[in-house]
Amino acid sequence: MNSIALPLLLPFAIAIGLLLVRSAVMSRWVGPLGSLAMLVVAVYLNFKVQQDGILTLNTGGWIAPFGIALVVDYLSSLMLVVSSLIAFVIALFANRNLPDDIPLSRFYFFFFTLNMGVNGAFITGDVFNLYVWFEVMLISSFVLITLGKKKAQLEGGIKYLALNIMGSMLFLAGLGLLYGKTGTLNMAHLAGILKNDHQAILMNPSSVLFFVAFGIKAAVFPLYFWLPSSYHTPDITISSLFAGLLTKVGVYTLIRFFTLFFVQDQVFWHNLLLIVAGLTMVTGGMAAATYYDTRRILSYHIISQIGYMIMGLGIFTPLAIAGAVFFTIHNMIAKTGTFIAAGLIAKIKGTYELKEVGGLYRQNPLLAVLFIIPAFALAGFPPISGFFAKFMLLKAGVDSGQYLITAIALITGFFTLYSMIKIWNEAFLKKQPEGRETGPGVKLQFADYAPLVILAGASLLMGIFAAPVFDYVMQAGDQLFEPSAYINAVLTPQLP
């Protein structure tokens, strides 16, 4: 099915068009419409997966495992839908909030190349091409983080680039060892080879390299320190885009690799994943509690929430993996929403420093409501999406006897709640501090609220209609826990 290639071809074609026609007026229309087209394609592929099963495309007519395979299963199709939704929302937000010193055409060019890299990472069935898409993401995100050319952005960009280049080097080294030991880089072929290989434990050096590489990308403990040093430096539009997408691609690859072909020596890996998950939750949550800059608070909470996703992978039951998938998509939506809300607060008050703002509940009750929905989703309040995502993970932890990590997850929830209440109290409930500037006095229009309305509505709908979402992620969890359907879908066409 050639439609499988559309998540790559569509953003590529749009980016080339923007490169040839550098018009701010055209970019203002192309950004939202192009990202909406990506969302339509993603929804279509998701529908086809539910109707026809796993979709595959062997590019160039080369049969697997010799050619480049594109694969769309339950997990990748869901990630395509959510990432495309976030891209659409960010495009709407950028048209209203991107500063004048960042050319709109330049922003959207790298915006679409970044989304091409993200989509490629989700649907590739080949480890080398995953590396290629990671590099596309890295180049695009580095340019985006430095747009504006301010000193803080350049410093944050260098920290971001340096650590992620190190991750890429480890990725490449692991890739070389993997190919040297197996003679293939097709993921399904790797899974088939290693499934019955009595010496598969010899893959541990490769899996360690991949774990560290993806751990850097996902910002897990102790590899996360690049994230809070860089995510607060660019414009909030770019920070919101990064918050929703980049670390989640790292989580996706960890889930994909450690359910598909790095399944040897499970006792060691699952215990390590649980330890890393617990430390990621606690350190991120505790660090967030110490700050009063909304961008730094939310950046550390990205780290903390990643711990829940890794927790599901470490427990490694169908329910736990499904819970990790549910939590990932919920967090992508809710975290982007809180960053956008922080941007709107700063647009009204002129600062991200909570000690310098106040009185927003009376001044803008709609913004207060639109902030509290994704904030409470992150904290796990019913009936919003985060409650059901956390409930699945906690139940999986109790069912499997993993009481310590379950207790850590519960405690971390209180850290999240504390931070969200701190933002709510400081920005919305307390009076404007005396002697402080009240801000530029910008009055928000409906178009300013639209991105946050979409994301807050998505969080609410995921909670209200949790049953069908639960059914879908359980199918994804079952497919990941028992990957034979994935292997057969990719490799069967080569059989006579």
Image (tube, rainbow, N blue to C red):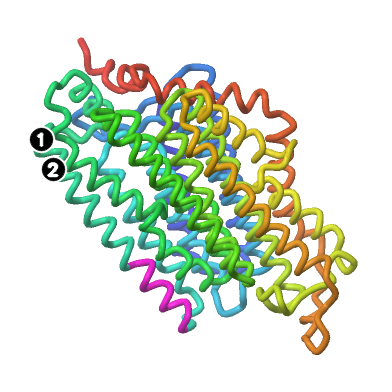
Tell me the residue at 45%/70% (across/down): 229
Q: How many marks?
A: 2
Q: x%, y% of residue 356?
A: 73, 79
Looking at this view, is 478 or 429 the one in front? 429
Say which quadrant the N terminus sits in: top left
Query: Mark 1: which secondary structure?
Result: helix
Tell me the residue at 48%/74% (across/down): 147
Q: Are marks 1 and 2 in contact (CB under 8 Å)?
A: yes
Measured Cα–Cα span from mark 1 to mark 2: 6 Å
Magenta residues, as a range? 151-161
Query: Mark 2: which secondary structure?
Result: helix
Q: Name the disc covering residue 423, or none.
A: none
Residue bearing mark 1: 181
Left or right of 414 on screen, residue 402: left
Q: x%, y% of residue 67?
A: 22, 32
Looking at this view, is 447 or 28 the one in front? 447
> Is the stretch drawn in magenta largely helix, strand or loop?
helix
Left or right of 68 on screen, residue 117: right
Say which quadrant the C terminus sits in: top left
Residue bearing mark 2: 177
* Residue 157 among those drawn in magenta: yes
Q: x%, y% of residue 333?
A: 61, 47
Left or right of 363 on screen, residue 269: left
Circle 2: is it few (<14), some (14-19), or many (20+) Cα within 10 Å?
some
Tell me the residue at 34%/49% (across/down): 214
What amino acid type should be assigned to the residue bearing mark 1?
A: Lys
What amino acid type should be assigned to the residue bearing mark 2?
A: Leu
Which residue of the protein is positioned furthest toward the left in this rendering? 180
Q: Is residue 288 visible?
A: yes
Q: x%, y% of residue 54?
A: 42, 22
